[in-house]
Image: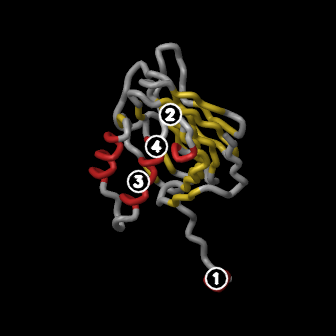
Amino acid sequence: MSGLIVPPGQGRKLVTKAQDVTFKVTAADGSSISVFEVIVPPGFDVGAHTHTKSQEFFYVLEGELELLAFEPAERTTDTWRNWESAAGDKAVRATAGSCMFVPPGTPHAFRNASDEPARMLFQSYPSPDHEHYFDEIVEIFSAGPSVDAEAVRQMRERYDVNQITPLRFEPPVLPNLRSATDRTA
């Protein structure tokens, strides 16, 4: 059997309103894990969630992300940003070289609170669950001008994603810049 070498920038790419995902290693390659390179834009928050059987690994390649992977002392359903574990754990600001492993049943989340895109390597077991998940999310996001929240909820349920707090994509608002001709002397 031979290995698989995927050069930089190569792999099947899916572009959504909220993320760019490049498939690097898949079930079609004979792998029991799926590996993706993900560009996380400013303002994207995956929302806290758990998986019953899936496990995941995240490795920050560029930029920074807020990461959370623990059971909070109290789960809230509006946001995970203020969660704290009974031992005092809080979400961390993760920069290039940081990683997060998420075993089944562990609440976890990530968001890009910066004003620059972040790039991460994402591994999911078992393959091909997240491969199908990303294929379907592209279909849902491209179905119209607004995202069908119920379709997203049903899809996430099918792929072992038990949502606790909402997925959000709130890109930063750029200042309203005036042109040089608009300025008064």
**Pointer 1: what residue?**
184
Q: Nearer the viewer, mark 1 or mark 4?
A: 4
**Pointer 4: what residue?**
130
Horizontal and vertical percent position of residue 183:
64, 81
Give the residue at x 58% y 53%. 22
Q: CA distance from mark 3 to mark 4?
A: 10 Å
61 vs 134, nearest the viewer: 134
Badge 2 amino acid = Tyr
Give the farthest residue toward the front. Answer: 1
Question: Quadrant of residue 139 in the image?
Answer: bottom left
Q: CA distance from mark 2 to mark 4?
A: 8 Å
Q: Do labels 2 and 4 touch, CB within 8 Å?
A: no
**Pointer 3: what residue?**
137
Above or below 93: residue 176: below
Give the residue at x 46% y 27%. 83
Q: 103 left or right of 95?
A: left
Give the residue at x 71% y 40%. 96
Of the 4 image quadrants, the one containing the N terminus is top right
Q: Disc 2 on helix, strand or loop?
A: strand
Badge 4 amino acid = His
Q: Earlier in the sequence, mark 1 or mark 2?
A: 2
Q: Nearer the viewer, mark 1 or mark 2?
A: 2
Q: Earlier in the sequence, mark 2 or mark 4?
A: 2
Q: Earlier in the sequence, mark 3 or mark 4?
A: 4
Q: Disc 3 on helix, strand or loop?
A: helix
